Structure formats: C-alpha cells, structure tokens
Amino acid sequence: MARKESVTKNIIIETAFQMTREEGFSLVTARRLANRIGCSTQPIFRVYENMGELKNEIFIKSKYFFESFYDDYPKTSTVPFENLGLAYIQFAEKESKLFQLLFLSEDRVEKNLYELLNGNKGAVKKEIQRAAEAGCKDPSNLFMKMWIFIHGAACMSITGDYDLSVEETADLLVESYLAYSRN
C-alpha cells in the first residue's frame, strides 16, 4: 500500500503565500519554506520542478488576492477613480508585502502595472468609462494623472510617510479628479 503524502501542493502554496504576506517574496526559499512546513525540501521539489515555478504560483495567488480585496472593498463614491484609489492605498497599507510583490517588483510574471490593476474584471477600464460618461474629454490622460497620485500615496504608506486618514485621502482624490478633469 502506497504511503499517503502528508505535504500536499496546497499546503506548500498556502504556506509560501503566508510567508510572502508576512515576510516578503524574496524571503521564500525552499529551505525556509520546508522549515516552516516541518519537512525536508524533498516534498517541495516533488511538487515543483524549481522555486521559479512555485514563485509564479505565489504571484498568481497574490494577484487574485488583490482582485478579491478590490472586489470586496466598499464602493461608496460616484466620483471616478476614488473607490479604486482608496482600495489600492488601503491594500498597500494592509498588505504591504503583497503590494510590493505585485506593484513594485520586477517579478510580475510578464504583467505590467496596468494589467495587474485592471484585473480580470476591467476595473481601470470601468473607471475610465465612468469619467468619460461624466464628461471628461480625455479620460485616459486623466487616469494617468490620477494614477501618479494614487500610486505615490500607496508607496508612501508602505514607507510610513503617508499619514492621512481614509476621509482625508478621499477628499484629496475628489479634489484631484475635479482639478484634472477640467484640463
């Protein structure tokens, strides 16, 4: 009778994902992962050909985690880009290691920032469409201007240099939208 495998692919990926959330992507090594699971590295390499393959799965899982975070984030504003901006900045604050992996690293599994942010449901495209419907003459250009503010605020929150409340951030997003949409 064959021995049942106690270290499954699911255990490996879930543990690696938790390590990424807590410590960062670069600290997920086979040896550290095996130690955290309580096994040798053999079960990891029985499931994955190499660490690159595992890291691709961690990235994909992180991307879906962000998409779920965004989907679940309360959409209370009618101002284009405000909900997206608030969710993105909050994600950076609450999940800084995943934010760094997805939006600040070169390990993006051949995805650019726009593709990651837009996600499977077209979040950015919807916001650009909302801006167009609100009368903005160049909503794509407006998005770029808004994005510089949003991404900058998110990055500042990771370094501890952003201390505005959600309400203050929402006010700034609305002010920025109104100022940029007039140009």
Image (cartoon, helix red, strand yellow):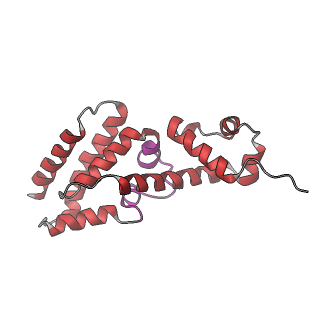
**Residue 165: where, in percent of width, then height?**
23, 36
Quarter residue 161 falls in: top left
Q: Residue at x 46, y 52 (%)?
A: 65
Residue lying farthest to the right in this orientation = 1
Q: Residue at x 66, y 48 (%)?
A: 11
Quick check: 136 above or below 53? Answer: below
Visible residue check, residue 25 = no
Left or right: 182 as drawn, with respect to 73 = left
Q: Residue at x 56, y 50 (%)?
A: 58
**Residue 54: where, in percent of width, then height?**
63, 51
Q: Nearer the viewer, residue 76 or 21?
A: 76
Visible residue check, residue 121 = yes
Left or right: 137 as drawn, with respect to 161 = left
Q: Residue at x 39, y 39 (%)?
A: 94
**Residue 169: where, in percent of width, then height?**
21, 42
Left or right: 73 as drawn, with respect to 143 = right
Q: Which residues are magenta?
A: 98-120
The count of marks equals: 0
Residue lying farthest to the left in this orientation = 182
**Residue 25: where, in percent of width, then height?**
54, 41
Q: Nearer the viewer, residue 75 or 149?
A: 75
Residue 107 among those drawn in magenta = yes
> Where the C terminus falls, by quadrant?
bottom left
> Where the N terminus falls, by quadrant?
bottom right
Quick check: 166 above or below 121? Answer: above
Residue 114 among those drawn in magenta = yes
